Image: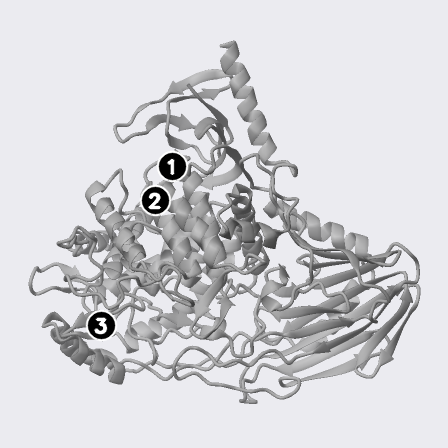
Amino acid sequence: MKSFRLLFDAAVAACALAGSAAATETVLWYRQPAAKWSEALPVGNGRLGAMVHGGVERERLALNESSLWSGQPGNYDRVGAHRHLAEVRRLLFEGKSREADVIVAKEFLGERPLGSYQPLGDLWLDFAPAATPPADYRRELDLAEAVARTSYRVGDVTLRREVFVSAPHQAVVVRLTSDRPGQISFRARLDRNPAAGTRDTPGSIVWTPGPLAGATVAVIGTDELELRGRADEGKPTAGVRFAARLKVLAEGGQVTPDGDALAVSGADAVTLLLVAATDYAGDEPAAACARQVAALAPVTFATLRAEHVADHQRFFNRVALTLGADDRRARPTDERLARLRGGESDPGLAALYFQYGRYLLLGSSRPGGLPANLQGIWNDDLNPPWFCGWHFDINAQMNYWLAETAALSECHEPFFTMIDRLRANGRQTARDVYGARGFVVAHRTNAWWFTSPVKGLNVWPPGAAWLCQHIWEHYRFTGDRAFLRDRGYPAMREAAEFFLDWLVPDPRTGLLVSGPSISPENNFLQDGKPTALAMGPTMDQQIVAELFDHCVAAATELGIDDAFVREVADKRARLAGPRIGSDGRLLEWLDEVPEREPGHRHMSHLYAVYPGGQITPRATPELAAAARASLAARIAAGGVGKVNASDASNVGWSLAWNAGLWARLREPARAHATFHALLERAVFANLLDGHPRKGRENVFQIDGNLGGAAALGEMLLQSHDGGIDLLPALPAEWSEGAFTGLRARGGYQIDAAWRNHALVSAVIVASQSGRCVVRAPQSFVVMSDGATLVSSEPDGAGAHVVRFDAACGRAYRIHSQ
């Protein structure tokens, strides 16, 4: 018993260690300034964002405001398109996909909407050339404080800068200090002339802006600058109007106007405050900025910083993670990345990447704002690839796979607000285009929330159903009945109503299928030629089945809608299910057809493995084996080593999805190898995810970061398969470590520590009362109030399991035997 006590105490200490600054990786740092935007460091508060370059003679802050969108609301529905459904379905059931596609393109797809997420502009700080080369340069991003820092020495003077974006005060804050008085001089200016690249999407508009991209700059008084403009994309009546205002506060020295800039000379310290606004929600932007600057006048820098850090840490400090004892933090992040690419193991870099994902979600998605888009909130391109919008065939959802497990449930709120906003337009699209009840969304949308299927894409109806998965997941993690009753279930019900009307029987089997639809962005071959349109693509069937299951569970939980539940349950029982092909793989389409791209980046037909949970090695071993075979084949067919190959082996978000799939399939070596490939092939030096583009530099997409962090979480903790699984896919490379604060479905907070690849201890805190099921790789006991509550037993599937009644607010300690 004494030896057990010592072991248990050591494990608890290991858990505590994970929460300490000494053990947790939370700093990215570099020995040189960023040479370009994709090397800069992101700061943000969910609405305002900046990319900090850390220059010596010139500092650039590339600025964003989340509602700065071109375009305008519009309806692109092809009214009455549903009159052609019977003919399209007949052709598809007869195997004539290309003929059906002609009808759909002509009758169902509306004009492409205008609208892109655009940058606000740039804040430049121009310094006089240094008399001697700078020394001791360091540029860093402190994730725990959400502060970007730059420091260097010129001669015997040390200069420092701090940049953060305050959520409590809604301002970008820059602080310049020196260790000697009177040493700070620079010229501050605002402009707006970002890159104007060509979009990748066929049929998109290419717009080359003027010198200030539709903006004007003015000096206000003696210490303020104002930027005004419109995100017009070449059309002066479309797009939001915006403004930004910069206040320069010098301690010592002088601030004077200098043309359209402000000159600071001989200051001891300087604080710059930048605010921004748009008329997206109806405000007059310049007046809103003036009010914000006035409100900041009595607030000291010390107060701004302290309140910013406190606000950030009330979210960020909920979770800590350490992987291994081999500390490499003394090396710059880009050097660590280069060494990893050279074959060196660095578990700490994986832990840093996980916390970076949490940091990025918190910085790009806060209650009251818009959800994180394709680049979060950080974009420097007036014509961003794929419009920088919300893509519902994977990207928008992947941004939020991390939210609940990583204890950032509040960050999910803008996603649910997006669903609320889509429902009104989606009802109209369901009625006018598809001839159905409920609501539906298309492949993508922008900040004007259109729901129409449009040219350049195709019809793909299950987007709204996939969005609603997040509603049920949020409820499973939080137990928030008011949210489910008042907001979540009504959306789920409407999404299900659409499919009650949409599903039709396959004439060959009598089973219900969805269609016309596609397996997102993929094609199969028909008579040797590529085509996409089909009846009953596997992803459609899986998403609909899951939605129906969730609706039945939610209505039962709330004690409502008995007749609706019966209708849903009846159609759920008649849905066509997943099929296994002749080679043992899970089929992507209803029939076994040749694939055009065997290494395609989308894993759509594996939705039921992850992020869904219908297919698991424990509950459905045959389907799990087929999914495993499908995933292995797709990766094997990928383009590893091919420059800019946009397939399953090179795309950041695809690698993230693959890693999560391998974790769900209980393949830790493959999960780790795929996660390693994500770091090796698909991130910039600043660890932001880079998506390949043919013939051009990779472009940032945040989904790879957030999905990669979620996949790491799946290796350490799962709770989708009827219980809490501790260390379900722990790689051999992470032989020891600990985490604190991760969340599990059922309302549990989990801490765990392991050594020599074996669980040592864990703590489970219940926020709800209920039956608790816990599984771990080896035998263990659960203790409560210092006494053994229950001992584990083999579960027959290679793990050990306990079941006990957990009480709200109680902590249960687990130790290995």
Q: Identify the residue at horizontal 77%, vertical 82% (top origin).
A: 218
Asked if the residue under mark 2 is in contact with the one under mark 1, i.e. CB atoms within 8 Å, the reply is: no
Q: How is the image coloured?
A: one colour
Q: Dot 1: what SS?
A: loop
Residue 524 is situated, as x and y percent measured from the top left of the image, at 21, 69
Residue located farthest toward the left when viewing the structure as drawn: 508
Type of the residue with mark 3: Leu
Residue 361 vertical position relative to residue 194 in the rendered view, above or below = above
Tag 2's secondary structure? helix
Q: Residues within 10 Å of mark 3 (few under 14, many from 20)?
A: many
Crowding near the residue tagged with mark 1, few <14, some 14–19, many ≥20 C-alpha atoms within 10 Å: many
Q: Is residue 100 above or below residue 211?
A: above
Q: Are marks 3 and 1 in contact (CB under 8 Å)?
A: no
Q: Which mark is residue 328?
A: none
| Alpha-carbon span between mark 1 and mark 2 | 8 Å
Q: Amino acid at mark 2?
A: Arg
Figure disc tally: 3
Residue 756: percent from left, percent from top: 46, 28
> What residue would you read off at disc 1?
728
Q: Quadrant of residue 134?
A: bottom right
Q: CA distance from mark 3 to mark 1?
A: 38 Å
The residue labelled by disc 2 is 664
Left or right side of 659 for 680 = right
Quick one: 610 or 695, which is closer to the camera?
695
Q: Mark 2 or mark 3, which is nearer the start of the sequence? A: 3
Q: Secondary structure at mark 3?
A: loop
Q: CA distance from mark 3 to mark 2?
A: 29 Å
Residue 400 visible, this orientation: no
Label 3 sits on residue: 533
**Which of pointers 3 and 1 indicates the residue nearer the eye?**
1
In front: 341, or 638? 341
What residue do we see at 19% from left, 71% from top? 525
